[in-house]
Amino acid sequence: MRTQMLYRTRSAVLFALIVAILPLANALCAEPVTSSGDASKTNSVVRSYGPETGYRTEVTSNTTGTLGSEDQQQVAILTAHVFQHIVHAQRALEADKTSDAQQEIVNGRNAIKAIRSLLPTTTVHTQTRSPNGKVIYEATRTVQADRVPLFEGMSSTKTLSPIVAAKQDAVEIKGLRLVGSETITTEAFADLDYVESQLDRASKALNDNEAGAAMKALTLCQVRGVEIRYHKEDAALAAARDALWLAKRALDENNAPQAQANLNVARQELELHRQLLPEAKRQDVTEMMAEVSKLEEKLKQDPVKTTDQSTNADRKSEQTRNSNAILKWWEQVNTWFGKRS
């Protein structure tokens, strides 16, 4: 089948995509987002332009919802599943299983709906009055973050190479390599609006018995639905970031020795990155290295084995605190990419 010949190389794109999300600060038109645990809380900002006695425009922004750490993880998992459903839909089309492909597309669209229910929403109301107080313009629009940053493992071959292959095949980018090679990939963003529009197009194409058009739309989700940025000089920082995430995962799996080993790698890579910075910009990295070293030393100590329930509960609580500390460092590292001057 001709469709199989054209798109077989993309059938495995993003299958193993596991992502984690940075806070979406400034994503909603630079309006502030509430940070409390009350998801229904609204943060209102009013800006006025023009003199009181002349033409005057007032812009009111109301942001509803929050995005805490747990919500970020949910968004991460759901975003990963969106692209997995895309891959499964492609595989189903290659096997001439149209109904299975349609179901995978439906699942992907539902995952995006779930993501949008988690992301904060901002309503912007604009009103302009003439000097006599008459309203001459008024409009209301609702906006939401549509570019979700993908970070966890984005510098690893396992995660990025399928995306890179798809983009190169589509002549979107050239010469992009992964960590350990010539070029370093440090940032990637999923465009939810674009991906959702292409999933809608793919679904319609299948309803019209146009498998080729559906496959093209699914491929565009991968090629144009993910934006990749990279900076060669961020190699050490990218390696430190990935090592921190691996350390967190090791702690979550109760593997303290592996977590300690990854923290050691992270600390060494942070030092390499620190040497690239001017003296005035090194303080934050130095402080993080000290904190990483402290936790590293703590994990070297073998915990005393006991069957006492309260002691086990305390150890679990300490493990959670350590894991959260690593997550905080990981999030901070992601804000450092490309910032040297």
Image: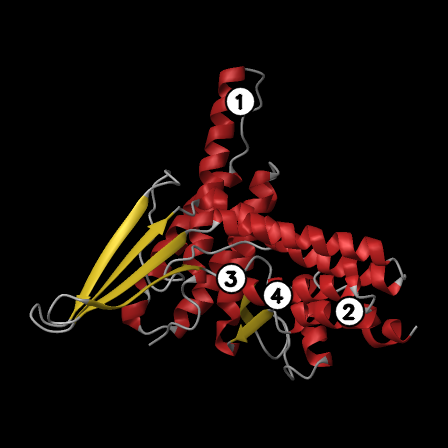
Q: Amino acid at mark 1?
A: Asn
Q: Earlier in the sequence, mark 4 or mark 3?
A: 3
Give left or right: position of 158 versus 66. right
- Residue name at image x 54 percent, y 66 percent: 189
Are dots 4 and 3 in contact, CB under 8 Å? Answer: no
338, 166: nearer the viewer: 166
Q: CA separation, marks 2 and 1?
A: 52 Å
SS at badge 4: helix
Are dots 1 and 4 in contact, CB under 8 Å? Answer: no
Q: Is residue 297 visible?
A: no
327, 7: nearer the viewer: 7
Q: CA separation, marks 3 and 1?
A: 37 Å
Q: Is residue 80 visible?
A: yes
Give left or right: position of 13 versus 51. right
Q: Residue 77 appears at what percent x and percent y?
A: 60, 49
Q: CA separation, marks 4 and 3?
A: 19 Å
Q: CA separation, marks 2 and 4?
A: 14 Å
Are dots 2 and 4 in contact, CB under 8 Å? Answer: no
Q: Is residue 301 above or below residue 8?
A: above
SS at badge 1: helix
SS at badge 2: helix
In the picture, the disc for residue 93 is none
Are dots 3 and 1 in contact, CB under 8 Å? Answer: no
Q: Amino acid at mark 3?
A: Pro
Q: Residue 243 appears at what percent x and percent y?
A: 55, 56
Q: Report the residue marked by disc 2.
A: 215
